[in-house]
Image (spheres, grey):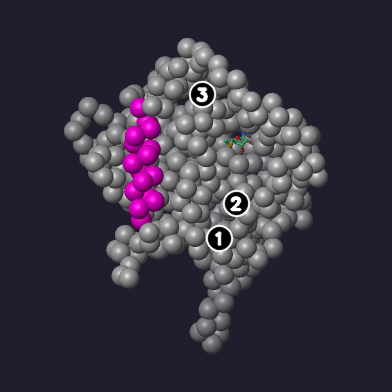
């Protein structure tokens, strides 16, 4: 069978746009591993490391060896769910869900009907033999290290490769090692390709043109550039929202939601315009705070909601669409700063026009798919855009990443040499 142009483009970019019949809604399937691998020349991210959750051995239900006590208790409690009335907030959340439901279902249907794409997805399960260190706990805990009294003394040694022409005219590389303070200082990777860094017996792969600041929220204003044309056209924010689920799993520390009012988003936004993307949870109280207080305080008007629908490698949803507390999707709000949204169109970019559904197979807990490629036409200002992620756990070429653990997914255990 002939491979479609869209599939060929997907092979190259990791972005697959789907036609959703009967709606004007945009839908796309993303392959995060393919997108991220576009950033590396000598290394590649290995699917079993990115999709480590999908490769975990299945737990035996009720087996005391493999099922933690608390989980067994919880399962028992959940065995006979007592139907209860939804409270006022929950009813609003349910109404939002009912509004989004047809859109999510038709986007998902368009994925399921695409046999070629599904065939490609199932191939992702190949290569399970890759030896994984992921989740072994041997990696550095940057959150802990950054809050210790020693943090000002920690240094990362980065090895830059400088091109060098030999006497016989052939090219070679000289390695130059430089130490940088790891915490509370901005580190830029100005190199022709990715560089390697060493810190406390762990090895890190840093993409070319990436930049990061590993610091606590208290030092977030260190990010504000000195000159306004150094500000950002794409600002992605994925806050550690206070949320029962995150606290239970203790994946990372959370911040009181109101602290986000002090995030200097307006001071980070480029004067020629910025697209802001904010990841939120499905809790109605949070949605109201964000829409009524947080976004207006950042100068964002009339946000558009996008949905990230999480699927398995066979294209099926990761869970029941209608399960109230465990929706298989997350919402992201998109809006502009320093852009006249009443104008019919932007000068060199498309204005957002309604909701879109983004589908992908989720990686590690709370890891979000990379969005720049999918949304590039909606980013205002000079090209290439200047991009920043706040509360980041990984680096991208041409981006600034800030948070208390932006090197988390740069550990070499997620990569193999090409
Ligand atoms: N976008 C990330 C990804 O795709 O992997 C996930 C970000 S996660 C939702 C929130 C991040 O904020 C975590 O890495 C957490 O450690 C970090 N964080 C929590 N409290 C923080 C603080 N006080 N200052 C800086 N970062 C913080």
Element at badge 3?
Answer: loop
> Quarter of the picture for ligand 1?
top right
The answer to whether residue 405 is above or below residue 13 is: above
Residue 257: which quarter of the image?
Answer: top right
Element at badge 2?
Answer: helix
Q: Which residue is mark 3?
A: 283
Q: Which residue is mark 1?
A: 125
Inspect the magenta stretch and tell me whether residue 363 lies in it: no
Residue 273 image point, x, y percent:
33, 35
Residue 339: which quarter of the image?
Answer: top left
Tags 3 and 2 touching, CB below 8 Å: no
- Which residue appears farthest toward the top when viewing the image? 88
Residue 311 image point, x, y percent:
48, 46
Q: Is residue 408 visible?
A: yes
Residue at figure coordinates x 62%, y 49% from the top left: 53
Q: What is the chief secondary structure element of the magenta stretch? A: helix
Q: Which residue is mark 2?
A: 54
Give 343 or 302, whichever is nearer the viewer: 302
Residue at figure coordinates x 44%, y 40% from the top left: 308
Task: Answer with mark 3 or mark 1, whichever residue precedes in sequence.
Answer: 1
Task: Answer with mark 3 or mark 2, whichever residue precedes in sequence.
Answer: 2
302 relative position to 181: left or right: left
Task: Answer with mark 1 or mark 2, whichever residue precedes in sequence.
Answer: 2
Tags 3 and 1 touching, CB below 8 Å: no
């Amino acid at each position: 069978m002939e491979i479609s142009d869209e599939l060929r483009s997907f092979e190259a970019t990791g972005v697959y746009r789907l036609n959703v019949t009967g709606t004007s809604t945009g839908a796309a399937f993303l392959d995060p591993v393919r997108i991220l691998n576009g950033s590396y020349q000598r290394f590649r991210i290995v699917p079993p490391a990115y999709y480590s959750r999908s490769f975990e051995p299945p737990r035996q239900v009720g087996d005391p060896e493999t099922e933690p006590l608390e989980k067994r208790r919880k399962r028992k409690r959940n065995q006979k769910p007592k139907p209860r009335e939804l409270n006022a907030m929950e009813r609003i959340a349910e109404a939002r869900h009912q509004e989004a439901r047809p859109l999510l279902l038709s986007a998902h249907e368009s994925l399921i009907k695409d046999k070629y794409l599904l065939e490609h997805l199932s191939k992702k399960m190949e290569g399970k033999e890759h030896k994984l260190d992921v989740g072994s706990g041997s990696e550095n805990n940057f959150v802990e290290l950054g809050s210790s009294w020693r943090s000002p003394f920690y240094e990362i040694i980065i090895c830059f490769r400088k091109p060098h022409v030999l006497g016989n005219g052939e090219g070679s590389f000289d390695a130059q090692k430089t130490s940088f303070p790891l915490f509370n200082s901005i580190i830029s990777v100005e190199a022709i390709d990715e560089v390697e860094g060493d810190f406390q017996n762990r090895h890190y792969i840093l993409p070319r043109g990436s930049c990061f600041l590993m610091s606590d929220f208290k030092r977030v204003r260190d990010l504000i550039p000195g000159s306004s044309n150094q500000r950002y056209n794409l600002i992605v924010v994925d806050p550690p929202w206070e949320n029962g689920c995150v606290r239970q799993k203790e994946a990372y520390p959370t911040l009181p939601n109101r602290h986000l009012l002090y995030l200097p988003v307006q001071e980070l936004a480029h004067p020629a315009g910025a697209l802001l993307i904010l990841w939120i949870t499905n809790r109605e109280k949070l949605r109201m705070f964000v829409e009524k207080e947080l976004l207006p305080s950042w100068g964002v008007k009339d946000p558009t909601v996008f949905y990230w629908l999480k699927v398995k490698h066979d294209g099926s949803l990761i869970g029941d669409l209608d399960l109230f507390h465990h929706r298989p999707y997350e919402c992201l709000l998109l809006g502009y700063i320093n852009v006249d949204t009443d104008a019919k169109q932007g000068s060199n970019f498309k204005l957002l026009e309604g909701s879109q559904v983004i589908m992908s197979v989720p990686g590690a807990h709370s890891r979000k798919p990379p969005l720049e490629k999918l949304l590039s036409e909606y980013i205002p200002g000079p090209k290439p855009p200047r991009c920043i992620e706040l509360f980041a756990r990984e680096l991208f070429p041409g981006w600034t990443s800030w948070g208390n653990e932006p090197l988390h997914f740069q550990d070499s255990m997620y990569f193999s040499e090409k």
